Image (spheres, helix red, strand yellow):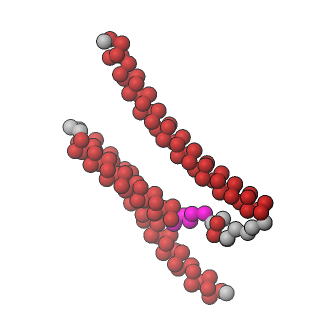
């Protein structure tokens, strides 16, 4: 029983850090695979002589990216707060979940400010043409 009681903290530490590393690896792998499939499709289209639509090369705009980050971080903050506050005896720790929540609110503010800037710039572009 002494060996098991000594291994519990080691396994806990390895599982916490290992899950974080595994999470980063999995996301990186799927981003890599998505980009690779897009480039493979471009290469096949060039070989076949087919032209791709212009929006195929268009990537996600900053505005859309800010909105996605905002929603994810706000939901993460809320879910962490609920899980920690109601799931543990140490409810004071739950208030740390407001950090991702408030960062998400910041991204939401960035989203709306960029969206307004884009709307203000579009009429100017049309007037110049």
**Total residue callouts:** 0
Quarter of the C terminus within the rendering: bottom right
Q: Is residue 119 left or right of residue 100?
A: right
Q: Is residue 86 in the magenta section? A: no
- Magenta stretch prevailing secondary structure: loop
Q: Residue 14: where, in percent of width, then height?
A: 44, 28
Task: State the residue at coordinates (46%, 66%).
Answer: 111
Task: State the residue at coordinates (61%, 49%).
Answer: 33
Q: Considering depth in this image, is 84 or 51 the residue closer to the camera?
A: 51
Give the residues drawn in magenta, as a range.
59-63
Q: Is residue 106 visible?
A: no
Q: Is residue 61 in the magenta section? A: yes
Q: Considering depth in this image, is 25 or 53 the residue closer to the camera?
A: 53
Task: State the residue at coordinates (22%, 44%).
Answer: 86
Task: State the residue at coordinates (63%, 69%).
Answer: 55
Quarter of the N terminus within the rendering: top left
Q: Residue 118: where, in percent of width, then height?
A: 54, 75
Q: Quadrant of residue 38?
A: bottom right
Q: Is residue 76 left or right of residue 89?
A: right
| Residue lying furthest front | 48
Q: Residue 64: where, in percent of width, then height?
A: 50, 65
């Amino acid at each position: 029983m002494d060996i098991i009681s000594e291994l519990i903290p080691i396994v806990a530490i390895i599982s916490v850090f290992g899950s974080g590393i595994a999470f980063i690896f999995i996301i990186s792998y799927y981003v890599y695979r998505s980009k690779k499939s897009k480039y493979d499709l471009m290469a096949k289209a060039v070989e076949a002589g087919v032209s791709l639509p212009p929006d195929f090369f268009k990537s996600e705009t900053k505005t859309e990216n800010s909105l996605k980050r905002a929603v994810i971080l706000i939901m993460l903050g809320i879910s962490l707060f609920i899980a920690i506050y109601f799931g543990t005896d140490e409810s004071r720790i739950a208030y740390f979940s407001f950090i991702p929540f408030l960062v998400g609110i910041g991204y939401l503010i960035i989203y709306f400010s960029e969206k307004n800037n884009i709307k203000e710039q579009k009429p100017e572009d049309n007037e110049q043409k």
